[in-house]
Image (cartoon, helix red, strand yellow):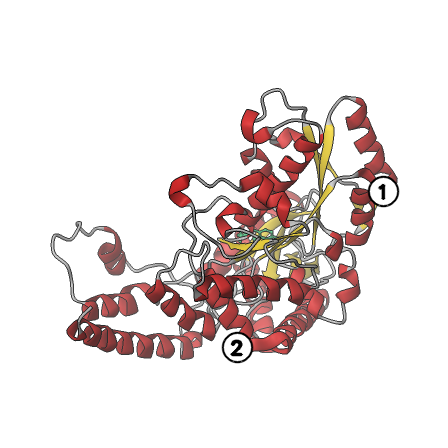
Amino acid sequence: MDEREAELIRDAGHALVDGVAEHLATVEDRPVWQPVPPDVLGRLVNVPLPEDGEALDWISESMLTDVLPYAMGNGHPAFFGWVNSPPSSAGMLASLVAAAMNASVVAGDHADVHIERTAVRWLAELVGFPHEPGAGLLTSGASAATVVCLAGARSRALTAVGHDVRRDGLVGAPQLTAYVPSEAHSCVRRALELLGLGSSCMREVPLDAGRLDAEALRASIAADRAEGRVPALLVGSAGTVNAGIIDPLSDLADVAEAEGLWYHVDGAYGAFGVLDPGIAARYRGMERADSLTLDPHKWLGVPVDAGCALVRNGDDLRDAFSLIPPYLRQHSGEPVGTFAEYGFEQTRPFRALKTWGTITELGRAGIAGQVIRANALARELATLVAGDPELELAATPETSIVAFRARPAGVSGDALEALNRALPTAIQARGRAFVTGTIFDGRETLRACILHRDTRSQHLALLVSEVREAARLAHTM
Ligand SMILES: Cc1ncc(COP(=O)(O)O)c(C=O)c1O
C-alpha cells in the first residue's frame, strides 16, 4: 500500500469513527428497532453488481447512512430480546485491528495465536473451569462450540466400545444415547443431528422445579444399556435460554461420573453468572464438566462472533479432529499442536482480539459488576411484574432473564395464548422497547433478557408499560 492509499484510509476511517461514536452516543434518541425504509431497502437490495469500484469515503458514508441506523436493536438499553448484548468499545476497535492483520489463527509465533491462547485461558479462569493449554478454542458461537464438544463426546464413547468413527463413520456403530433436559437450547439437538446420532438418541432428563430425580435418570440409563444402546452424554444448562434457570449442575455431574457419561454444560448465556456472589453457589458442579460452552458475545459484549469451547481433556478434541495433510503442515512450536486440530475450521478469524480487548477493558471486577447489576435489574423487573395485576411472572429469575406473561382482565384460554404470542411483534413495532417470546411451561411467554450496561430502572418501567399498552390495544381491537 502506498502513502496515497494510506491517506484515503485515514480520511474515510476518521469520518467512520466519528459517525460510529455519534451513533452510539445518540442511540436512545432513535427507535429501539425500526423497519428499513423503502428507499434505503432499495439501495441495499435492488442494486446491480458494480462494474467499477467506489471510493472509500463513499463506502464509509453509505455504511453510516444506510446500514448503521437499521440494526436489530441490541445497542439500545430498552432492548430485551433473545440473548444479544451491545458491543464493547474495546471489542469494536479490536475488530478493526484484527481485520487489518487479517490473520488465519492456526499456529505459529504471531500475536494472534498467543492472544487466542490467553483469551481462552482467561475465559476459563473467569468461570472457574480447569484449563490446560490446548483444551479449548474460540468458535463462531455456542452452536459451533457445541458441535465441537459433542464431537469429542461421540469420539470418546465410540472409541471406548472399539468403534473407529473417523474411519467407519456410524456404520456398524452401536446407538449412542444422550440425556438432554427439555429446556436445553436447540443447538444441542442440532449438534446431535449433525453428528449423525439423530434426535431420537435424546432422552429426557427428569428435572422438576430445578430438582433432579437422579434415580429416574439412572433407571433410564440402565434401560438403554439393557437394550444394547450406549449411554454417552449428559447435558446441563448453566442458564437456560427461556428463563435463565441454572440446572442442578452438581447432581448432574454426580450421575455423569457414576455412569461414565460425558458431561456437557451449556454456559453460552449463563456461565458468567457465576461471577455474581449471590448465586455463585448455584453453579457448583460446572467445573466438573467434560466440556463447557461459553459465548463471550453474550454477557461480555464481545462483538459477534465469539463463542468458546472448553474441554477438560484437550486430547478428546484432538482425537476427534486432528487431520494434517502435507499441504497444511505447520510447526506450532507447542506440544499442543495447532488450533485447527481441535475443531472443524482451518482458516480461523482473529476473534480473540475483541475477546482479549473486552476482558482487558472491563477486568474481572468490571465483568462481575455488569453481571451483578443485570441480575439485580432482573429481580427488579420481576417485582414490577409480580406487583402488576395485568401481568404474571412465569418463573422466579435466577439470572438476568425474566419470563412473564400478560393477563389482562377478561382474557383467558386460547385468547390469552394468542395475545401473548402476538405481543412481542406488536411491542417491537412500537419501537420503544424490544422483547421476544417463547413457549415456557407449555404456554406462550414473554422473556426479557437484560445484558445492556446502560439499562436502568426507567427502561424496565418502560417495558412494563409497553407490554400493558400493547396488550390493551390488541384486546380492544
Ligand atoms: C443457553 C444458550 N445456549 C446456546 C445458544 C446458542 O448460541 P449461539 O447463538 O452463539 O450459537 C444460546 C443462544 O442464545 C443460548 O442462549
- The front one of 241 and 3 is 3
Q: Residues within 10 Å of mark 1 (few under 14, many from 20)?
A: some
* Quadrant for the N terminus in the image: bottom left
Q: Which mark is residue 361?
A: 2
Where residue 459 sits in the image (x, y, percent)?
56, 73
Residue 9: image location, x then y, percent: 23, 73
Query: Whole-Å distance between the Cαs marked 1 and 2?
Result: 42 Å
- Secondary structure category for the residue under label 1: helix
Q: Residues within 10 Å of mark 2 (few under 14, many from 20)?
A: some
The response on whether ligand 1 sits within 8 Å of label 1 is no
Whether residue 263 sits left or right of residue 426 in the image: it is right
Residue 158 lies, with reference to residue 449, above or below; the image says above
Toward the right, the furthest residue is 215
The kind of residue on which mark 2 rests is: Glu
Q: Which mark is residue 214?
A: 1
Q: Secondary structure at mark 2?
A: helix
228 vs 14: above or below: above
Residue at the far left: name it.
52
The x, y position of residue 393, in whole percent, is 71, 59
Q: Residue furthest top?
A: 172
356 and 213: which one is in front?
356
Q: What residue lies at 69% left-to-right and 56% top-to-bottom?
A: 238
Mark number, residue 416: none
Q: Nearer the viewer, residue 387 or 250?
A: 250
Disc 1 vs disc 2: which is toward the camera?
2
Q: How many marks?
A: 2
Is 224 positioned to the left or the right of 264 in the image? right
Whole-percent x and y of residue 97? 37, 69
Label 1 amino acid?
Ala
Quarter of image, res 230: top right
